[in-house]
Image: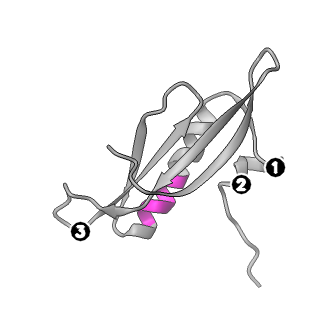
């Protein structure tokens, strides 16, 4: 799958076991209709560069927003499973989860 037009990107700092620092970049492509869907589903590609596998993955949804949200979630899970020490502004879950307080 092609990443296509990048609509969002974040640079994350990684720390290797030897204490050296490295950069991880996550990118999200623009959601687009899934050409293989007969139901009008959408696909949102994503990429994590800097952890060894720079291939493009994707998440699917019934509309563009669901595909985008699931793509962000998939990246968050992959980063958590990487086992690396990663940081973005000291935020838990690298700022990839939004849970605003609504009143």
Query: Toward which corner of the image does residue 50 lie, by quadrant?
Result: top right
84 w.r.t. 25: above or below: above
66 w.r.t. 95: above or below: below
SS of the residue at dot 1? loop
Mark 1 lies on residue:
89
Real-space CA distance between mark 3 and mark 1, rounded to the nearest whole angstrom: 38 Å
Real-space CA distance between mark 2 and mark 1, rounded to the nearest whole angstrom: 8 Å
For marks 2 and 1 on the same chain, the one whose residue lies earlier in the sequence: 1
The residue closer to the viewer here, 67 or 4, is 4
Query: Toward which corner of the image does residue 67 lie, by quadrant?
Result: bottom left
Asked if residue 72 lies left or right of residue 39, the reply is right
| Predominant SS along the magenta part | helix
Asked if residue 52 lies left or right of residue 89, the reply is left
For marks 3 and 1 on the same chain, the one whose residue lies earlier in the sequence: 3
Pointers 2 and 1 in contact (CB under 8 A)? Answer: yes
Looking at the rendering, the stretch of residues picked out in magenta corresponds to 66-72
Q: Residue furthest bottom?
A: 103
Pointers 3 and 1 in contact (CB under 8 A)? Answer: no
Q: Please report the residue visible at 66 percent of the width from the left and 58 percent of the height from the top.
A: 97
Q: Which mark is residue 13?
A: none
48 w.r.t. 33: above or below: above
Mark 3 lies on residue:
40
Query: Toward which corner of the image does residue 22 lie, by quadrant?
Result: top right
- On whether residue 68 falls in the magenta region, the answer is yes
- On whether residue 76 falls in the magenta region, the answer is no
Mark 2 lies on residue:
95
Residue 42 percent location from the top left of the image: 32, 63
Residue 102 percent location from the top left of the image: 74, 80
Quadrant (top left, top right, bottom left, bottom right) of the N terminus: top left
């Amino acid at each position: 799958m092609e990443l296509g037009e990048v609509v969002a990107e974040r640079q994350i700092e990684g720390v290797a076991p030897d204490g050296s620092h490295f950069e991880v970049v996550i990118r999200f492509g623009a959601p687009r209709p899934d050409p293989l869907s007969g139901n009008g589903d959408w696909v949102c590609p994503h990429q994590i560069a800097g952890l060894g596998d720079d291939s493009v993955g994707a998440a699917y949804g019934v509309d563009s927003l669901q595909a985008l949200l699931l793509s962000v979630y998939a990246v968050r899970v992959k980063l958590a499973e990487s086992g690396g020490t990663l940081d973005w502004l000291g935020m838990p879950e690298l700022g990839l989860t939004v849970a605003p307080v609504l009143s």
